[in-house]
Amino acid sequence: MTPATDSPARRPRRPTWAGRNYTLLTAAAVVTNLGSQGALIAAAFAVLDEGGDGGDVGLVAAARTLPLVLFLLIGGAVADRLPRHRVMVAANTLNCLSQAAFAALVIAGEPQLWQMMLLTALGGTGQAFFNPAAEGMLLSSVSGKQAGRAFAMFRLAMHGAGLGGAALGGAMVAVVGPGWVLAVDAVAFAVAGALRAFLDVSHIPAREPGGGMLTDLRDGWREVVGRPWLWSIVAQFSVVVAVVGAAEAVYGPLVARDSLGGPGPWGLALAAFGAGTVGGALLMMRWKPRRLLLAGTLCVFPLALPSAALAVPVPVGPLCAVMFVTGAAIEVFGVSWMTALHQEIPEDKLSRVSAYDWFGSIAMVPLATALAGPAESAFGRAASLWGCAVLVVVVTAAVLCVPDVRNLTRHTREVAQGAPVKSEPAHSDS
């Protein structure tokens, strides 16, 4: 007879690493991504539908990112001082209200550019406080040698939702207009915030009183600059995210309008990117590269491909293939990066380090998106897109010159997050 302990009724319904917090965080991320991917398309076409051009699309995109640059570091310090789930819920509330107002303006007709920029900026402010808190909460929700698999599963669920959201959002923009897609995103923020309100932070040690916000920020800065692999990759992504963001947020919709047939095909291309991230996450569920950051950084090179494809421009089919490969490749980097942060950064500094990571990654995005329109006027759209592709290749090659990036290795024995272990140094080749 089969022992009672092996009966289906007694088997765990989920893996041991998928605890309550992890499950709630994953469910909330799925809901948010279902709405947000369509909203990105909707915001761009809301501007174009009102007679805006590439410069106007870039200004709205920059308005979302500028508050991230201004408030991210403060958001990281706040998230390491206050219960992270409360910071997340407050940020989701602001995102919900700002997106609902944006939707109402678009549905009512004739929204002004400054109104769209203001409401988008409020949404960006919410994200500035949300992102460090959310990443710190996720990194502290798992432990042990299965952390990489947990992060891959989280990203699989998140990007799977993004895949559906992008395809559905592009279709909805074409059928019912961008305003209703923005309204759906507002509802998604409300639902996700409600889920995150039930997160349990009792396992996180109480923070000892510190010397204030500046002291917290200095502590986070020391964590970053003391690790060459960390600051070099953050610097790399300050360029990569900026040029890729400009290509996809500004030039992508314009190429779609002029050469691909409108928002539907562009939504399909973004959905192909989402499908690629799903494939990459499935790969990382099983593959555990020993040299985490070497494998991840090599997979950043394909981020040059979408800009090159838009520069040609290629038809929808090849563009979707390029976007799929890019999505799979960047997912290898994403899981490797989260695993490195999880094993190397103390728990009480996770949100501050995450804030510096986010800050460095998006610091140049407002400038890049704002200059995308003038660059198109000065050099032409194709030349600007080829420039984006070249920059991705150059800075990624430069990062591979950093020994710690090539040699940081995965811990092979189980260790709780934030508990330092004595292992091979990052520069070891053994």
Image: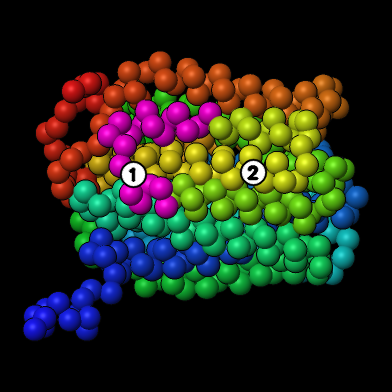
Q: Are marks 2 and 1 in contact (CB under 8 Å)?
A: no
Question: Residue shown at 32%/66% (left/top)?
Answer: 21
Relative image position of residue 13 (x, y in whole percent): 28, 74
- Identified by mark 1, the residue type is Trp
Alpha carbon distance from label 2 to label 1: 23 Å
Going by the image, does 278 lie left or right of 7? right
Which residue is at a point 75% across and 66% down the rendered structure image?
A: 172
In this rendering, is residue 395 above or below 243? Answer: above
Give the residue furthest to the right.
51
In the structure shown, which secondary structural element does the residue marked by tag 2 occupy? helix
Tell me where the magenta segment starts and ends, as one range.
282-301
Residue 354 picture quarter: top left
Residue 58 visible in the current orientation: no
Which residue does the numbered mark 2 point to in the structure image? Answer: 321
Residue 287 is marked as 1
Viewer-side residue, 71 vs 103: 103
Callout 2, which amino acid?
Ala
Residue at 43% of width from left, 38% of height from top? Answer: 333
The circle on residue 430 is: none
Residue 330 percent location from the top left of the image: 50, 40
Q: How would you rate the neighbour count of disc 2 (Cα within 10 Å): few for under 14, some for 14-19, many for 20 or more?
A: some
Q: Nearer the viewer, residue 283 or 411?
A: 283
Residue 133 picture location, percent across and down = 40, 53
Residue 94 relative to residue 138: left or right: right
Q: Specify the quadrant of the image occupied by residue 390.
A: top right
Asked which secondary structure carries label 1, the reply is loop
User: Is 413 or 62 nearer to us in this picture?
Assistant: 413
